[in-house]
Image (cartoon, grey):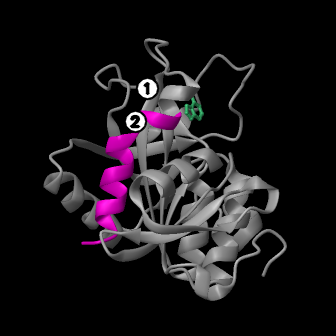
Amino acid sequence: MTPHIESRKEDISDTVIMPGDPLRAKFIAEHYLEDARLINSVRNCLAYTGKYKGKEVTVFASGMGIPSIGIYAYELYKFYDVKKIIRIGTCGTYQKELNLFDLILVSSSVSESNFGKVFGNDDSEKVDSSAILNQKLIEASNLLNKHLSIGNIYCSEAFYSMNSTLSPLVSKYQCLGVEMESFALFHIAKQLNKEASCLLAVSDSVVSKEETTSEEREKGLTDLIEVALTATII
Ligand code: HPA
């Protein structure tokens, strides 16, 4: 047990799917997993372990933002011997060619965040996802006939901002969109020699101002969930 996770070590698979929203973790467990059991509810950060097409997987919510995913990802890798974490989440897009619910596989996460420096003395503003795990996600998307856009993401520390200009990192690294967690996840995986990837569905557009409802976000993300789960059994 850790300060934030009440599970026993044997309750958590070496492969974790990590949505931000605890209710999305519950939705995945109830709709996709066989024999799913609740293995964490500390702070309502719900986590379930079950089987997807016969193979064990854990679905563990991260909460929102770099500090929250930083706690769960670290504890899972370090104290529960988790090897792979696939974050699944939503993002805003900067690209007018991308539509709501399109899928983005994150190559690298870029941010002004101090997380890498504070956590691991690494001041890189750009940190990569796992090429091996990404390859599985690409194979899964091909198997399911789902299109993935592959590129960099801007990881923001503030959902709301008084600043109307975009971060210079967005154009410097041609970011496809914005979310708030991948930078911490990739930095932690890099320091601990683990695998981490991030698959995102577009939930809003910074360009067209279109957005999805919270109900659609909870229920309408089936492509995202199915590609991620399929990658765990390849
Ligand atoms: N900004 C930051 N994170 C997000 C957004 C956004 O517009 N949409 C979904 N996650």
Tell whether circle 1 marks a residue whose Cβ is less than 8 angstroms from ligand 1.
no
Q: Helix, strand or loop at disc 2?
A: loop
| Position of 43 relative to 203 (above/below) | below
* Left or right placement of residue 88 versus residue 167 in this view: left
- State the extent of the magenta-drawn residues as a range: 218-234
Where does residue 208 sit, x and y in percent of width and height? Answer: 43, 12
Q: CA distance from mark 1 to mark 2?
A: 6 Å
Q: In the image, residue 51 lies at what x, y percent?
A: 41, 71
Q: From what the image shows, is residue 213 above or below residue 4?
A: above
Q: Which amino acid lies under the numbered mark 2 shown in the image of this protein?
A: Leu
First in sequence: mark 1 vs mark 2: 1
Who's the residue at 36% across and 57% down the image?
Answer: 228
- Residue 94: give its label: 1
Quadrant placement of the C terminus: bottom left
**Would you name the residue on which mark 2 appears?**
176
Q: Quadrant of residue 62?
A: bottom right
**Are the residues at dot 1 and dot 2 in contact (C-beta closer than 8 Å)?**
yes
Residue 195 in the image, given as x and y percentages of width and height = 45, 73
Residue at 64 percent of width and 50 percent of height: 22
Residue 24 forms part of the magenta stretch: no
